[in-house]
Image (spheres, rainbow, N blue to C red):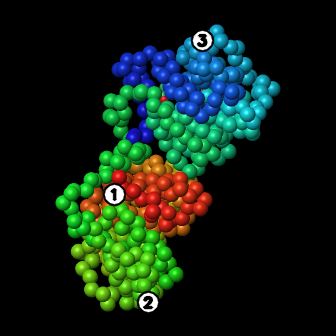
Amino acid sequence: MKILDVEQIRQLDKYTIANEPIAPIQLMERASQAFVDWFRMRFDALTPVKIFCGLGNNGGDGLAIARLLIQANYIVEVFVVRHAPRESDDFAHNHRRLKLLINPHYIEKPGDMPTLRQKDVVIDAILGSGISRPVEGIVKVVVEAINRAPAQVVAVDIASGLYANQPNQPGEVAVQPDYTVTFELPKLALLLPGNARWVGEWHMVDIGLHQRFIDQAPTPFYYTTDDEARLLLRRRDKFSHKGTFGHALLLVGSYGKMGAAVLAARACLRSGVGLLTVQVPHCGYEVLQTAVPEAMCRPDVNERVLTGPSEVDGPALADYSALGLGPGIGKAPETVRFLREVMTAFNRPMVIDADALNLIAEHRDLMGLLPENSILTPHPKEFERLTQRWQNDYDKLELLRDFAQRKQVIVVLKGAYTAVALPNGEVHFNSTGNPGMSTGGTGDVLTGVLTALLAQGYDPIEAAVLGVFAHGQAGDVAARERGQIGLTASDVVDGLRWD
Ligand SMILES: NC(=O)C1=CN([C@@H]2O[C@H](COP(=O)(O)OP(=O)(O)OC[C@H]3O[C@@H](n4cnc5c(N)ncnc54)[C@H](OP(=O)(O)O)[C@@H]3O)[C@@H](O)[C@H]2O)[C@H](O)CC1
Ligand SMILES: [K+]
């Protein structure tokens, strides 16, 4: 699903109005009805509702929402914040209609702000995507009062004061909602970690904007939906055999970090690889053979770290279908040499994680050896080591896009809404996963998943988008069974499903 910027959304509005065709006021009605449908599923008619409206179209939505909720027997009070000399036409229209039902209150000075109680639900329709400057004056007073109140808050489209696709400056004020109900498409701001308190839990409601415009609109930003991920998944042929699904090699583990090897290996096997060989330092031999009997093990001649040679014969590096390296490997000088050898000998896309990324950051010559379309899976700190410090989330996104394009690699920047940056400049935000996954080992699981997909012949871009989605989904399955707090990386492996 595409993520469009504010200007594109404005054009999309106009295009829908001209080409559906539909009157602007009807479009507002449809958006408001979609919001109300969502709202009624969460809050019953006994909930006292207080709606704060600005004078633009976000405020117009708020007034229409008020009317629709009153018609559904909710007890609604409306507060119009007089922040500008003008009101939009559709605001004015809905204002007239609402006044036939109730008298709104008007907020012009701080004393006009009502007291908000815990049982109230506030609907924030003061400012939407049309915000053009920082929140000040009476709007600021209202926003701060809403944020101090014990009431639950639901933002219409986007929290008042939050920019949809540009950074808010430090110290700027915006509503901190419990929920954001956004129209039609996600907005970039909803996906960025620095905005978490201005977003809450967000939901998207369909308001029937014109698909033809969306299809043609250029954007580097996408949000991976369930349906899109499902389309990437390949079905298995009845006559397939284990050779069909590739032979993966994982280079993982070191003394004290053999769990990373086990987790990556188990995840790889649970993601459909045909055959798996795991090379671990010698001390990991028994661990691996016992914990993952389905995998073949190539013990390194070195007791504690990976160095390359093994007393067990196996295919030449270049003969494996896919390679995953990094989890738990440490940063020993022998391992750096081995990494250099591996990256020289294997010139197809590989999965690179954890200490392999740190080693690349420390030994810049390795960066030049990265095979095109390799999948790098840093968390933010690892990505910072590969690049530089950033000012804000938007700055980070540009660094991410630039890195993926310059190095012609795929970068999976892990976190909420993991961002998958592609060599063509696109960024695909993931829609699955939960905070329970912020626990040791879940990254190792992802390495196993991605390596398995490459081994099965998935295109690296599809492997990255699908693998990240499936990994998050496995985390969601695990969280449903165990709750987020008790979730472990092993639960994520057990949650993997591919149908
Ligand atoms: N396609 C859709 O998704 C639809 C969205 N709808 C809703 O429309 C809003 C966007 O409406 P718009 O009128 O463009 O903008 P706003 O309501 O957000 O605000 C515009 C007015 O607010 C003034 N403004 C801007 N910034 C500030 C500020 N910091 N403080 C005070 N006032 C501010 C602005 O003044 P200008 O001087 O900049 O002109 C306007 O007066 C969208 O979010 C949806 O809720 C449609 O209902 C249906 C389709
Ligand atoms: K709003």
* Dots 3, 2 in contact, CB < 8 A: no
Would the CB of label 1 be found within 8 Å of ligand 1? no
Residue 396 visible here: no
The answer to whether 17 appears left or right of 241 in the picture is right
Q: Which numbered circle lies on residue 97?
A: 3
Residue corresponding to mark 1: 463
Residue for point 61% across, 11% down: 96
**Amino acid type of disc 3?**
Arg
**Amino acid type of disc 2?**
Glu
Q: Position of residue 3 (x, y in %)?
A: 43, 40
Query: Which quadrant holds residue 470?
Result: bottom left
Q: Which numbered circle lies on residue 303?
A: 2
Query: Which quadrant holds residue 436?
Result: bottom right
Q: Earlier in the sequence, mark 1 or mark 3?
A: 3
Would the CB of label 2 be found within 8 Å of ligand 2? no
* Mark 1–mark 3 distance (CA, rounded to whole Å): 52 Å
Q: Position of residue 70 (x, y in %)?
A: 63, 19
Seen in the picture, residue 374 relative to 210 is either above or below; the reply is below
* Mark 2–mark 1 distance (CA, rounded to whole Å): 33 Å
Seen in the picture, residue 29 relative to 189 is either above or below; the reply is above
Q: Nearer the viewer, residue 171 or 144?
A: 144
Q: Position of residue 147 (x, y in %)?
A: 71, 39
The answer to whether 135 appears left or right of 419 in the picture is right
Q: Residues within 10 Å of mark 1 (few under 14, many from 20)?
A: many
Residue 32 visible here: yes
